[in-house]
Amino acid sequence: MLQNTFYAYKNSFRGLSNEVWWLALITFINRAGTMVLPFLTLYLHKHLHFTLAEVGWIMSIFGLGSLFGSYLGGKLTDKFGFYQVMFYSLFISGLMLIALQFITTFWGFSIAIFFTMMVADMFRPAMFVSVKAYSKPENQTRTLTLVRLAINLGFTFGPFLGGIIIAVISYKGLFWVDGLTCILAILIFRRVLKNKNLNRKSTVEDDEIIPISVLKDKPFLVFLVIVFIMAVIFFQLFTTLPIFYRDIYGLTELQIGLLMALNGGIIFIFEMPLIHRLEKSSIERIRIIMIGLLLFSFSFLLLITTQWIGILIISMLVISFGEMLGFPFTNSFAISRAPKGKEGKFMAFYTMSFALAHIFSAKFGMFIIDLFGYNSNWFLMGVLGLIAVILTFWLKKLISVEQ
């Protein structure tokens, strides 16, 4: 049984190009250093002594910078190519992350985080386009999953190492490590990967008809709303949940890091074989996304049911499986709708939905918690997940009309 599981895991990686493996390694190095994000709300609230309302505003500005950066990244990718955008985005944002530690005022940090995220998130649409360039059409979902696997493996190490750095050095050590790993990752990228032009026709499933403009693609616009809601729910993991763990359950930064590392560890073990099996099945992508949303919703509703500390682990497991089912197939759906020459723009809108969610997720979550308490926020996240599930039925109907 164990041998069969090993071979199934090994087979799920077959057929991927060398460039894809390098891209995954570079992504891992970068994400392992991204240890500021899980502790950013704690840093602002505990170390800089900002109020919860101020923390909410900063996280919203964080998302606003990401929104602008995603849009610019898409435009620049279509104009100059993914390679140059990826290089300069990570290199410059690495320097800016190091500089963040020296800014301690509310307005100063707000302005700095806006420009840092604007530059940093130019990387995201370019990275998605690079996946299309370096992978075969039939391997795109698995390639995206491998990149996500690298991201989550990095997140497994990141929070754990971040907790240790805070305990041994200080919060400022996080900014040094985050910035330097960004620079290291992109220097390796420049060394081992050559620029590659996108010169093949876009690949789509038989049941998908792709309009030229994003704004004229009604199914894609409904899809973006679904992704936005999914991201609003998921970003609670990095904004309100760390504060909840500390305030209600008294967890230390190291314990919070270990709990959040569980998310990355579960995904590292199960996601690639799961996606490989689902790709071979006849289950529609939209149906898989819907199941992921149901798990997202359930994970937060669980937090209302009891004060038992073990529910934190159960909730984290549920949201982890929801993430495995939801995000890889939203990635592949988005990239499959992009016509040749418009990949950057379509993936920019996709990543902008995450950035827009950052603007609303933290601020709205902090606002609800401040007025009504944590349980009200968890209930609201559960309801939002169910609304997104209803929207997936609408999306399925719209796509069926295109057939």
Image (tube, rainbow, N blue to C red):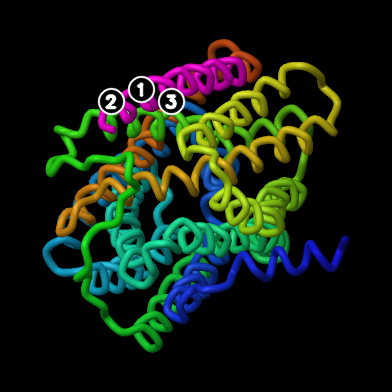
3 or 2: mark nearer the eye: 2
How far across and down, in percent of the image, does residue 38 sit?
Answer: 57, 48
- Type of the residue with mark 3: Thr
Residue 380, relative to residue 142: is it above or below?
above
Secondary structure, mark 2, is helix
Closer to the N terminus: mark 1 or mark 3?
3
Task: Identify the mark at residue 401; answer none if there is no mark.
Answer: 2
Identify which residue is drawn at 71% across, 64% down. Answer: 8
- Decide whether residue 84 is among the magenta residues: no
Residue 20, relative to residue 232: is it above or below?
below
Calculate the distance from the C-alpha at mark 1 to the C-alpha at mark 2.
7 Å
- Give the quarter of the figure containing the C terminus: top left
Specify few, some or many for label 1: CA neighbours under 10 Å numbering under 14, 14-19, or 20 or more: few
How far across and down, in percent of the image, does residue 327 sit?
Answer: 49, 44
Range of magenta residues: 377-403
The residue under label 1 is 397
Q: Is residue 242 visible?
A: no
Counting labels gives 3
Identify which residue is drawn at 67% across, 29% down. Answer: 299
Q: Are marks 1 and 2 in contact (CB under 8 Å)?
A: yes
- Type of the residue with mark 1: Lys
Question: In screen coordinates, is 17 left or right of 344?
Answer: right
**Relative to the observer, which residue lies in front, 171 or 381?**
381
**Relative to the observer, which residue lies in front, 38 or 95?**
38
Calculate the distance from the C-alpha at mark 3 to the C-alpha at mark 2.
14 Å
The residue under label 3 is 392
Question: In screen coordinates, is 141 left or right of 149?
Answer: left
Residue 237, relative to residue 199: is it above or below?
above
